[in-house]
Image: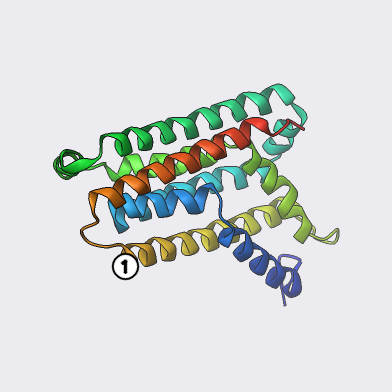
Amino acid sequence: MTLHGLGGHELALFVAATFVLNATPGVDLLLTVSRTLQGGARAGIAAALGIAAGCAVHALAAAFGLASLLALSPRAFTALQWAGAAYLLWLALGMARRAWRGGAAQATACAAVPRSRSADFRSGLLTNVLNPKVALFFLAFLPQFIGPGVADKTLAFLLLGLMFVVQSLVFLLALAVLTARLRRPQASPRLARTLQAGGAALFAALAWRLLLARAP
């Protein structure tokens, strides 16, 4: 059985590969876990929805050839790369600042002025949209499962992109719910500060890694 020219074997392989990619620690997984630990299940779910929206943007870009333009323009690639790294560093600095302040005053402030779900959604969206590696990943990954016999390759791109986004979203939503259940209702101030500091270090490292990557 085929789906617009895509064989069942290719689809099964695509689903398996997508699962492995989702389970590999990266910005998406770390952001979802981090926001869930800090703000609960709703924060993690909002971040996951933003991540999915960002993936959808890149999938559409790959389907309509925008990602290939990015691959051919080192300046555009570098500009987006710097923007993505700057945003990750901004997230890292915010987490480091909260870890430095810590204490009961921080807990009271967070309870009084909770972070909005729209802010969590934007965090997930921007970490994806501002990462040129995600765009090039879609451009390199999706064609591996589209054979030369597929008549409408744009439609095939869109279908595989949709499958990737849906599967990734389901994975991240499950991760957020599981993390929320394992999260202690009343974490100690020391643990909260440790989580903030660890998250800051991880995002700073990811920003540094992104800056070190060379444009194609």
- Residue 17 is situated, as x and y percent measured from the top left of the image, at 67, 64
Q: In screen coordinates, is 175 left or right of 106?
A: right
- Residue 155 is situated, as x and y percent measured from the top left of the image, at 68, 54
Give residue 80's quadrant in the image: top right
The residue indicated by pointer 1 is 181
- Residue pictured at 55% horizontal, 43% vertical: 57
Judge whether 206 appears above or below 171 on screen: above
Judge whether 210 appears above or below 27 on screen: above
Judge whether 171 appears above or below 139 on screen: below
- Residue pictured at 30% horizontal, 55% vertical: 42
Q: Which residue lies furthest to the bottom in this view?
A: 1
Q: Mark 1 packing: few (<14 Cα in 10 Å), some, or many (20+)?
A: some
In this rendering, does residue 52 appear at all? no
Report the number of numbered marks: 1
Give residue 133's quadrant in the image: top right
Judge whether 140 appears above or below 127 on screen: below
- Residue 118 is situated, as x and y percent measured from the top left of the image, at 32, 42
Q: Is mark 1 on a helix, strand or loop?
A: helix
Q: In which quarter of the image is the C terminus?
A: top right
Front residue of this view, candidates 197 and 79: 197
Way the structure is coloured: rainbow
Front residue of this view, candidates 47 and 72: 47
